[in-house]
Amino acid sequence: MKRLIRTIRLPLIVEIANSILIQLFGKSSILLYFSWAVTVSVIFWGGFLVIKEKWGTLLRAACVGPVILILGFMLIGGLYNAITGDFTQVMKSVKIDMNPRLVYLVGVVISTLMFLPLAGLISLLGAVIGRKSGTEKGEA
């Protein structure tokens, strides 16, 4: 596990910074699109690094994407909004008599679970391109 974190530490740092910045400044749709582009790039980069650093197989590389997505989208973005968000307008339009923060968190978890396979495919694509380009450590 330590080697995985060491291998993908730069993509993790970029994704954490991306998630924090979008929570603080991301009210426009252009910034949200840019944030998703950064997340997709970071997931691709993480899969590429797993192969480049010879940390593991394509399966391990495919697992990097979901790890990055869970960290950035669900843990940082989801928890931040659940704690600081204003849900009065949302709860007026939705006829659910529940804690709005809990409803939001459940929505974040469900949407994260929906996108985990896509994140795995993107990081797998990065790993395959890394393998095909012959950029494994020691070959360059």
Image: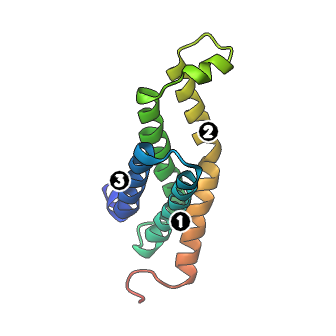
The residue positioned 43% from the left and 39% from the top of the image is 75
Marks 1 and 3, the one that precedes in the sequence: 3
* SS for callout 3: loop
* 5 left or right of 60 in image: left
* SS for callout 2: helix
Residue type (three-letter) at the residue carrying disc 1: Phe
Residue type (three-letter) at the residue carrying disc 3: Met
Q: Where residue 7 appears, x then y in whole percent?
A: 36, 64
What residue is pinned by disc 3? 1
Marks 2 and 3, the one that precedes in the sequence: 3
The residue positioned 63% from the left and 51% from the top of the image is 117
Q: Where residue 92 appears, x then y in whole percent?
A: 63, 17
Task: Indicate whether 58 appears above or below 116.
Answer: below
What residue is pinned by disc 1? 44
* 13 left or right of 101 in image: left
* SS for callout 1: helix
Viewer-proximal residue among 12 and 24: 24
State the mark number for residue 11.
none
Task: Indicate whether 47 appears above or below 70.
Answer: below
What residue is pinned by disc 2? 111
Task: Indicate whether 114 appears above or below 97.
Answer: below
Q: Where residue 83 appears, x then y in whole percent?
A: 41, 27
Most extreme residue toward the bottom is 140
Residue type (three-letter) at the residue carrying disc 2: Ser
Q: Residues within 10 Å of mark 1 (few under 14, many from 20)?
A: many
* Image quadrant in which the C terminus is located: bottom left
